[in-house]
Amino acid sequence: METLERIVADHPFARGLDRRHLELLAGCASNVRFETNQVAFHEGEEANEFYLIREGKMAVELHAPERGPINILTVGGGEVLGWSWLVPPYRWSFDARAIEPTRAIALDGKCLREKSERDNELGYQLHKRIAQIMEERLQATRLQLLNLYEVHT
Amino acid sequence: MSDNHSTFVLERDNFQQLLDVLVGRRYQVVGPTVRDGAIVYDTVSSTADLPVGWTDEQTGGSYRLRRRSDQALFGYAVGPNSWKRFLHPPVVRLWQATRQGNRLEIQEEVHENGKMAFLGVRSCELHAILIQDRVFLHGQQVETRYRSRREQVFVVAVNCAQAGGTCFCTSMNTGPKARSGFDLALTEVLGEGRHYFLVEVGTEAGAEVLRELRHRPAEDAERQAADRICARTAAAMGRSMDTVDIRDLLYRNYEHARWDNVAARCLTCANCTMVCPTCFCTTVEDVTDLKGEHAERWQKWDSCFTMDFSYIHGGSVRATPKARYRQWMTHKLATWIDQFGTSGCVGCGRCITWCPVGIDITEEVSAIRQSEAGRNAKQNHGNT
Amino acid sequence: MVPQPWCVRRSWWETDDSFSFELQAQNEGPTFQFSPGQFNMLYVFGIGEVPISISGNSAKAETLIHTVRAVGPTTRALGDLKRGAPLGVRGPFGSGWPVDEAMGKDLLIVAGGIGMAPLRPVVYAVLARRQQFGRVCLLYGTRTPDDILYAKELQKWGKRTDLETLVTVDRASPGWTGNVGVVTTLIARAQFDPQHAIAMVCGPEIMMRFTVRELQTRGMRSDGIHISMERNMKCAVGFCGHCQFGPTFICKDGPIFRYDKIGHLLAIREI
C-alpha cells in the first residue's frame, strides 16, 4: 500500500521538494475522491484547502443566472486545483465540480499557510510552484481572450 | 367552545329557500356540483344541483367520488377547483388597442361583474381568499379588478363534517371550523332522524338573508352537536405539517439533497399551482389581428413550474425541475411569510391529491426537518 | 394600469446592438417624472412589452430617453421603430439609486455593458449639484471599444476635473489606447475613501458579484454597496409573481437593492 508521502511525492507539484518539506506536506494531506458532479467548493466559500489531482477531471466554473454553470477551465491528472488558499482574502472565486470521477490529494492550505509564516523556506517553495501555475493559467487565459478562431473580416 | 356568533337552525327541507333568496337578491350563486367525476364549483340554483349523497376519497395522486350512505349536501372535502377561479379568473382581457397610422388608442377593459354568492366555502378556502386579499388588496398597489369582484361576494361557509384524505388545515391553523370572514356559516348535522344546518351569522348582510328564511334560534344540544362534528373532523386529518420555524428551516436548506430527490419525481406539470387556492402567478399575452390595426392584452394564470417563467435574455434562471420545485415550495411555505405576513399554504391538500405522482408537500417538509435533526444529532454525538 | 400612448421623437444607434430613443407623449400631458434607476415597461403594438431602464436626465422632465439592447423580438421591434412611430409606456417603476444617501460621501459608479444606461441618470443628477458630493468616480467596462455607450459624453466627462472617469474594454481593437481588462481592475485605481463611500453597481450578474468582492476587499461595507437586479417581468407591479428573487419582488422591492440585504441570495444557484 502506498503511503500518502509516496503519493504526494509522485505528483508533479512536489517535484524538487526536499524530504523535510515533503513530510510537512504529507502531514497536511488526505486522500479524496469526487464522484461525477460532486462539488469541491463554491464561489465565496473560505478557501482552506487545495487539491493535487491524481486522475479524473475537475471543471472550474462560474454560475450565471440565465446560463447556468459556465465552464472556464478544466484541471486534470497531474495538475493543481486552487490557489485562493494562498492569496488573501482566502475565498474561492469560482466553483469547482468533478466532470469525471476524480481522485486527488487534498492539502490543508490553511495549515500550510500558517506553517509557512514560521518556515519561510517552505513558504518560498509553495509560492514558487503556485506562481508557476498562475503564470501558465494567465498565459492560457490571455490566449483564450484573443478568440483566435474567430473569423476577422 | 362556540364563538360569539348568533346561532340558528335551518332545517334541510328549507335549504332551497337559501338559494332562492340569494338568486332573488340578484346574486349569481356559485356552489359545488358533480361533473366529470369531480365536485367542482359552478352556478347552482337548486338543491338538486349540489353533490347530494356524494363524498370524495383523496390521497396522493388520487381522487375518486363515492356514494355516501346518507343524503348529506356537503359530505365531501374539496375538489380541484377553488374560489380563486371566480375572484382571480384564469383568463382576463386587460385592454384593447387600435393603431391608425401613428396614433395609438388603448382602451382598458371594464369588467361588469355581477355580484356572486359563494355557497359551500370551506374554512381553508376562506383563509385562502383572505390570503389572496393580502396579495391583491393590501400592498402598495391594489388590483382593482380583484377588488371589484371581491367586494360584492356573499360568503356562505360550510364547516367540514369529515376531513379529506390529504387535509391538514389544523396544522396550518385554517380550520376545520370557519371563525370569521363569512356572511353565514353552516354546519350540516345529520342523524337520529334529523337533518339540519346550524347557522352562524357573521355579518349584517348575512343576518338580512337569514331573516328571509324559515329559521329559529339553536338549542344548546344542537350547538354541541355541531361542535362535536367539527372536533371529530379536526381529529381525523389525513396529513400534518410541523410548521414550527418553517421559514428559517427552508431558508437554511436551499441546497438540501431532498430537492434532488423530489426533482427526480416532479414532472413540472403545474397541476399543483392550478389547483392551489392561493397560487396567484399570471402571465400576459399580447395578440394582434392580421391587419395589425387591433391588438389586445390578455392576462392568464401562469405557473412557476414552466420553463419560461423565469426567462431572461439568454435563458431561464430556474432551468432545472429541482430549482422550480424548490421555488414553489419555498415560496408557499417560507418567502410568502416575509412577503405577506402569513403562510401561503392553507392545508387543503389539493396539491397532494392532484399531483400525478403524488408528491406530498408535508412529506417533503418532514424529510428536510428530520435529516437536519439527524445531522445535528450526529454532530452533537461527535462532540461527546 | 394600461400603457400610455407615446411616440418616438428621434432614435439613434449607440453601438451595433444598442440604441437610444427619445419619446414624446402622444396626448399633451404632464411631463414625465422619474428617479435615476427606475424603469418603464415599453410596449410595441401587437408584439410585447419589456422593462427598460430610463437613461435620460431626471431633471429634464420634458424629455424621456431610454437605451435598449436589441437582443429579443420585442427589443428588436423597438429598434425598428421609426420617427413618429407609436409605442406604449407604463411606469415609472421600481426603487431608484440612493443618490441622496451619497451626499457628503465619495461616490463610486461601476457600470458593465448595458448597465451604463440606468447609471447615466445618476451622473447627471450628481453633476447637477456636484458640490454636495465628495469624490465621484465613474468606472465603465464593456466588451470592445465599439461597444462603448455614450462615447462622446464619456469623453466630455473625462475632461472634467471634478469627476474621475475610467473606461476599460475586455478586448481592444486596433488603435485603442485606453485601458484593457475587466472593469474590476479599475477599482484599485479609483480614488475614494472606502470607509466613507457609496457604490452603485450595474451590469451582468457575474460582473456585479466580482465588483462587490473587489469593493469589499478595498474596505467597503456591504451596506454602502447598491446593485441593480434583473429578472423576468410581466406586470411590474408585484402581482404576476415572475420577478421574484428569494422573498423580494424585483419590480417593487428593487430593482436596486442594498447589497447586505440580498447578498446571500446571489450565492444560491437558480434561485
Image (spheres, rainbow, N blue to C red):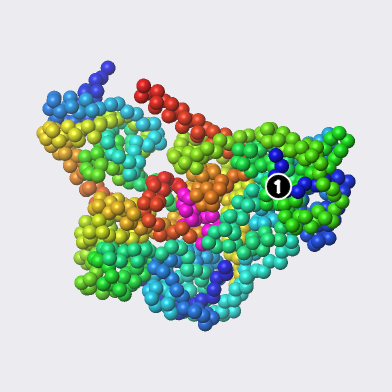
- Answer above or below: position of A110 versus B197: above
- Report whether residue A16 is seen: yes
Q: Which residue is mark 1?
A: B4
Which secondary structure, mark 1? loop
Q: Nearer the viewer, residue A125 or B370?
A: B370
- Residue C210 position, x and y percent, is 31, 52
Span shown in magenta = C236-250
- Residue C242 position, x and y percent, is 52, 55
Residue C237, magenta (yes or no):
yes
Q: Residue at x 48, y 56 (%)?
A: C249
Q: Residue at x 67, y 34 (%)?
A: B237
Q: Residue furthest bottom?
A: C28
Q: Residue at x 31, y 64 (%)?
A: C102
Q: Residue furthest left?
A: A121
Q: Nearer the viewer, residue B192 or B340?
A: B192
- Answer above or below: position of A88 versus C180: above
Q: Residue at x 47, y 68 (%)?
A: C92
Looking at the rendered structure, the kind of residue marked 1 is Asn
- Report whether residue A151 is seen: no
- Residue C213 position, x and y percent, is 30, 50
Q: Main secondary structure of the magenta part?
A: loop
Quadrant in which residue B60 is drawn: top right
At label 1, counting other C-alpha atoms closer than 10 Å, the crowd grade (few under 14, some 14-19, many 20 or more) is few
User: On the picture, is B367 further left or further right than B129?
Assistant: left
